[in-house]
């Protein structure tokens, strides 16, 4: 065994200080490798014991005290901690998906009260213009109007996925699950439309849809590696839906 | 000026020296499963026992903080991430599967938080370690000069963050490659490769500085 091979094998060990017998023989007879190995072991020891800045312990004590004094209760999500961004605009950019959900709930409630109990009134029109509300309404209209257009649904799927990506950072949990379900519905719809599409008339339709789904799949998988724990599974679900949908469409094309 | 915590390693580095060659600490692989009392604490926390979770906070705070300090090079930011990690961990403690590795699960949450924080560029990076080598004591200080420790700290600080994170998880926290992979959301092979590359990069930088000049016969063909 030459020195290079030996060193590579030592670097790959779980613990370079614990050298197997077949490598130890080389170290005993090779002064250069023995010195190199000794340095590696010392470097690792230095890494393991390097000092870090001390804190006054206040944050730790406060958190421990909060848990100790709170007694017994079901674990529940803490208050949303939104990192302080450099600008107000940055903070708003983080929060818009949550606002979108809130707007969706608001518009649902208003619509229910308006159309179910007092048909004919125009209270919704009296609300001030709201860009978030507009986005929800536009998405809903697009979904309803896209009954015969697979491309459009693919675009809508991208919209939902983009929204889910942003939401994953600020509001993991139930909202993300909801987004994943919404995406699944759209995915099924894309597949149905893709199967029924007239390829003679529009030969590029399947290709476009597949490309959109591939992009969604890749981005969702990537985001899942960085997202908060509660967002990981919904993002994986989105990626899975996109993957399964594109596979079905690819079979037809 | 930042103070320096005492050198009481919290990971496997804390174990007494056992090696035949240099008297330094040995990293040993832990089985990764919680000890009996820890499993009880986790079960209690899952049932809503908040004081039980407080004990877990006390147990893991320093380990998380040390690791995150290495990643962020920013003490206050590391502390923020630790706090956020425990809050999220408590909120999600019911999703923790009994029998799996609680430490890896917790570090995974911390890693996600770190990635999110890095993306939002909230870090105020400082060259932490090189300024603090004066405070290194014990067998490591005996074996390496102050200058050597400074070189090592600088070299570690220059490693790409993913390599540094994997190396410190393995070397300081004593996580297995499988657990490093779980924490960082990568495959075990990638974890192994990152640790390998981190060591290789460190040695490539440090060998010319800290080893005697090579002679003609110092490398066998």
Image (spheres, coloured by chain):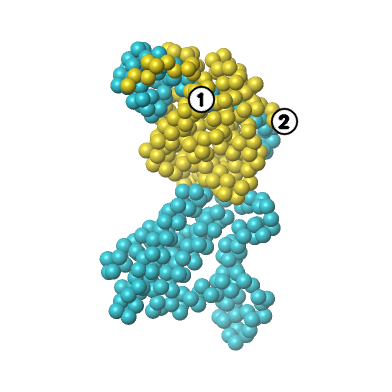
Chain colours: A cyan, B yellow
Q: Is residue B40 visible?
A: no
Residue B50: image quadrant is: top right
Residue A137: image quadrant is: bottom right
Q: Residues within 10 Å of mark 2 (few under 14, many from 20)?
A: few
Which residue of the protein is positioned furthest toward the bottom in this rendering?
A120
- Viewed as shown, does residue A176 lie left or right of A91? left
Determine whether A196 is above or below B72 in the image: below
On the image, the x and y values in percent for residue A12 come to 38, 29
Q: Earlier in the sequence, mark 1 or mark 2?
A: 2
Q: Which residue position is annotated with label 1?
A: B206
The alpha-carbon separation of the residues under discs 1 and 2 comes to 28 Å
> What kind of element bears circle 1?
helix
The chain letter under disc 1 is B
Q: Looking at this view, is A174 or A2 the one in front? A: A2
Q: Residues within 10 Å of mark 1 (few under 14, many from 20)?
A: some
Q: Quadrant of the C terminus of chain A?
A: bottom left
On the image, the x and y values in percent for residue A179 come to 48, 62
Q: Give the total of numbered labels.
A: 2
Q: Quadrant of the N terminus of chain A?
A: top left
Q: Which residue position is annotated with label 2?
A: B1
Q: Is residue B115 visible?
A: yes
On the image, the x and y values in percent for residue A104 come to 57, 69
On the image, the x and y values in percent for residue A55 come to 67, 32
Determine whether A40 is above or below B201 in the image: above
Please say if the residues under marks 1 and 2 sit with CB atoms less than 8 Å apart.
Answer: no
1 or 2: mark nearer the eye: 1
């Amino acid at each position: 065994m030459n020195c290079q091979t030996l060193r590579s094998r030592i670097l790959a060990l779980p613990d370079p200080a614990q050298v197997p017998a077949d490598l130890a023989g080389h170290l005993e007879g090779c002064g250069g490798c023995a010195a190199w190995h000794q340095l590696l072991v010392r470097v690792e020891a230095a890494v393991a014991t390097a000092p870090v800045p001390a804190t006054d312990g206040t944050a730790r004590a406060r958190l421990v005290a909060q848990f100790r004094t709170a007694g017994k209760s079901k674990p529940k999500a803490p208050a949303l901690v939104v990192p302080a961004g450099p600008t107000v605009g940055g903070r708003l950019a983080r929060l818009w998906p949550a606002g979108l959900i809130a707007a969706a709930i608001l518009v649902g409630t208003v619509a229910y009260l308006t159309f179910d109990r007092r048909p004919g009134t125009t209270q919704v029109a009296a609300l001030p213009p709201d860009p978030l509300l507009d986005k929800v309404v536009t998405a809903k209209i697009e979904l309803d109007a896209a009954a015969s257009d697979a491309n459009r649904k693919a675009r809508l799927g991208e919209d939902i996925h983009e929204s889910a990506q942003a939401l994953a950072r600020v509001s993991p949990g139930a909202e993300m699950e909801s987004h994943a379900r919404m995406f699944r519905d759209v995915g099924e719809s894309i597949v149905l439309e893709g199967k029924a599409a007239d390829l003679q008339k529009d030969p590029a339709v399947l290709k476009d849809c597949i490309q959109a789904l591939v992009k969604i799949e890749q981005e969702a998988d990537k985001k899942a590696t960085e997202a908060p724990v509660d967002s990981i599974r919904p993002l994986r679900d989105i990626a899975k839906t996109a993957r399964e949908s594109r596979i079905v469409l690819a079979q037809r094309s | 000026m930042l103070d320096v915590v005492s050198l009481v390693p919290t990971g496997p580095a804390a174990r007494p020296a056992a090696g035949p060659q240099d008297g330094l600490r040995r990293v040993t692989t832990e089985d990764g499963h919680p000890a009996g009392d820890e499993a009880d604490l986790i079960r209690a926390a899952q049932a809503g026992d908040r004081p039980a979770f407080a004990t877990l906070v006390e147990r893991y705070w320093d380990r998380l903080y040390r690791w995150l300090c290495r990643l962020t090079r920013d003490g206050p930011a590391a502390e923020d991430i630790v706090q956020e990690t425990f809050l999220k961990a408590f909120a999600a403690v019911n999703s923790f599967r009994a029998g799996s590795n609680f430490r890896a699960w917790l570090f995974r949450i911390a890693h996600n938080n770190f990635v999110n924080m890095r993306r939002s560029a909230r870090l105020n990076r400082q060259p932490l370690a090189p300024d603090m080598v004066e405070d290194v004591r014990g067998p490591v200080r005996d074996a390496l000069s102050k200058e050597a420790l400074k070189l090592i700290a600088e070299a570690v600080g220059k490693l790409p963050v993913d390599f540094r994170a994997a190396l410190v998880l393995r070397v300081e926290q004593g996580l297995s490659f499988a657990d490093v992979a779980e924490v960082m959301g990568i495959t075990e092979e990638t974890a192994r490769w990152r640790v390998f590359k981190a060591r290789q990069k460190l040695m490539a930088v440090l060998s010319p500085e800290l080893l005697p000049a090579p002679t003609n016969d110092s490398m066998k063909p």
